[in-house]
Image (cartoon, rainbow, N blue to C red):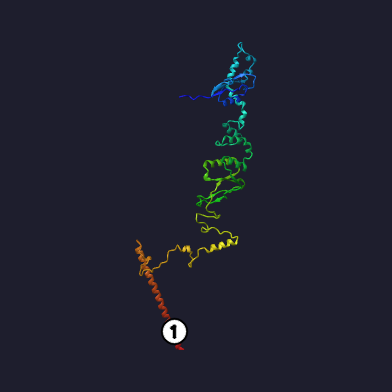
Amino acid sequence: MIAQQRALVRMPEVVGMPLPKAKAILERAGLVVRDTVFEESYEERNTVLKQKPARGQMVYAGETALLTISRESYVKWLPSLFQRNDINGQNFIRDFLWIIQHLFATVEEQLDSVHRFVDSYECPEEFLPWLASWSAMVIDQAWPVEKKRRLIRKSVELYRVRGSIKGLRLFISLFTGHEPVIHENVWPFRGWRMGVTSEISIDTVILPTVNLAHVFVVEMPIAYNNVSMEEVARIHDVIQREKPANTEYYLRFAAEEQTSVLRQFFSIGTQSGIGVGEAPAEAITSEEDLQKALEASRRQPTKSSKGVDEAEESLLPPARKRPPLPKAPRADLAPIEGQERTRADSSVMQAATQAIKTADTGTKTMMGDKKSLDEKKLDDDKGAKK
């Protein structure tokens, strides 16, 4: 198998350039800078003094380049006795301190570029949450890096509008992508409402009265069915963090179109209500409303001669059409299991009572007839005497 041949590149000239610029040029040419050597010089700090490979040399792409840069040795901070060279021109303390300078070179580079960490457009991405915490700015990890850097740069300006309607609307739109409508001094409940099934002590809600000066309603332009539970929790989190501490809020989503119009009257149940399921009469404000009310009254069910509505009369059993059977036993005199004797005794007592009543009536009739004959005879005797 033939190995793939690497491309040849020409070594560019980087001597006399600052180290960051030299690294950028070499990386663009396809080379890698991994090692740097410090050398004491009067040139500006981190200026490239030597390069290997040399300028114009052809090398393979991906090769390592070695750069020698200018630095001041730590030996200058020591007494002059330690800065002298020996008879061979060597200084052990200077060479030993170069090792320490190489070890702490990364720390020095970070200290030299510490100003980059307070600029949102230059600091590393993993440093952005720490930078945002300086102004109490919370960023979403799902946001693009450009959006994070831009909002952190504007965090001080955004902090000025926190706690206001403008700031609340802005932060909700940033985290959700939908700009809400906020209604101030509005509350959807008046302290007492009935539930769906209208069962007392089960789903009846009794709420304390609220101060309308400290409440508001957040209405999202999206339907609740199109929002996940994570997004709802995020909206609540944003509102709790950005609203004033002495206020209360109510979150509402866009309602779907209703097929029926809700009436503003007190109702219990689905088809019934106070007033036998009828809505209260609407106010008559014009001649057209009066004509509609009269037509509605004409269409109401009329009552029969017995005072029963036609709707109620349809529920009554039909009248009996056949005559009763002759000599049919009465239902109230029919024997009952376990009470035959009592029922028979009752029948005998009723018959005796009826006979006594009949005898008393005959006696009274006879006495009345006898009294009438005596009075007639007395009248005849009085006439004869005269």
Tell me the quarter of the picture where residue 64 sits: top right
Q: Position of residue 200 (x, y in %)?
A: 51, 52
Q: Position of residue 127 (x, y in %)?
A: 58, 31
Q: How many marks?
A: 1
Q: Position of residue 259 (x, y in %)?
A: 52, 52
Give the residue drawn at x 61%, y 28%: 114
The amino acid type of the residue labelled 1 equals Leu
Residue placed most toward the observer, 332 or 284: 284
Tell me the quarter of the picture where residue 279 sits: bottom right
Q: Quadrant of the N terminus?
A: top left
Tell me the quarter of the picture where residue 351 sits: bottom left
Pointer 1: residues within 10 angstroms few (<14), some, or many (20+)? few
Relative vertical location of residue 300 with respect to residue 52 in this rendering, above or below = below
Give the residue drawn at x 58%, y 35%: 146
Tag 1 secondary structure? helix
Horizontal relation, residue 233 to residue 361: left or right: right
Q: Position of residue 11 (x, y in %)?
A: 57, 22
Residue linked to disc 1: 378
Give the residue drawn at x 52%, y 42%: 229
Give the residue drawn at x 47%, y 62%: 312
Instruction: Farthest residue to the top: give it.
Output: 87
